[in-house]
Amino acid sequence: MTTDSSSLFISSSSSSLSSSSPATHFPSQPIPFGLDEKSLDQIAVDLPRCHAYDPLLASDLGQLRLKRVILSALLQEPKRHEYTQVYAWLK
């Protein structure tokens, strides 16, 4: 199984997901579910910086998993949620 860091999904030879699936075009093409390209581009910029000290989140697999969680949350109600970078140390 291989992980493509520019893809939303993990691909493998037995996977039923095709590379032509709209959700795999990240971030070069917007996902057609109400997310704008600006948010997708910002997520792509922020992911490598997010918890880079953590071995899992610093890995391609960890970043892929985090990206999927963020996008899943945003896609639950795209008109209600929007992506912003948040600093955990701000109180």
Image (spheres, rainbow, N blue to C red):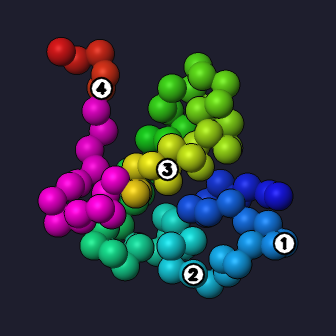
Q: Say which label, 3 or 4, has the lower sequence index.
A: 3
Q: CA distance from mark 1 to mark 4?
A: 39 Å
Q: Say which label, 3 or 1, has the lower sequence index.
A: 1
Residue 32 horizontal side relative to residue 12, left or right: left
Q: Residue 68 appears at what percent x and percent y?
A: 50, 53
Q: Secondary structure at mark 4?
A: loop
Q: Nearer the viewer, mark 4 or mark 2?
A: 2
Q: Nearer the viewer, mark 3 or mark 1?
A: 1
Residue 1 occupies quadrant? bottom right
Q: Secondary structure at mark 3?
A: helix
Q: CA distance from mark 2 to mark 3?
A: 17 Å
Q: Say which label, 1 or 4, has the lower sequence index.
A: 1
| Closer-to-camera residue (85/22) | 22
Judge whether residue 75 is colored magenta: yes
What amino acid type is highlighted by mark number 2? Ser
Q: Which mark is residue 57?
A: none
Q: Which mark is residue 13?
A: 1
Q: Say which label, 4 or 2, has the lower sequence index.
A: 2
Which span is picked out in magenta?
A: 73-86
Quarter of the image with the C terminus is top left
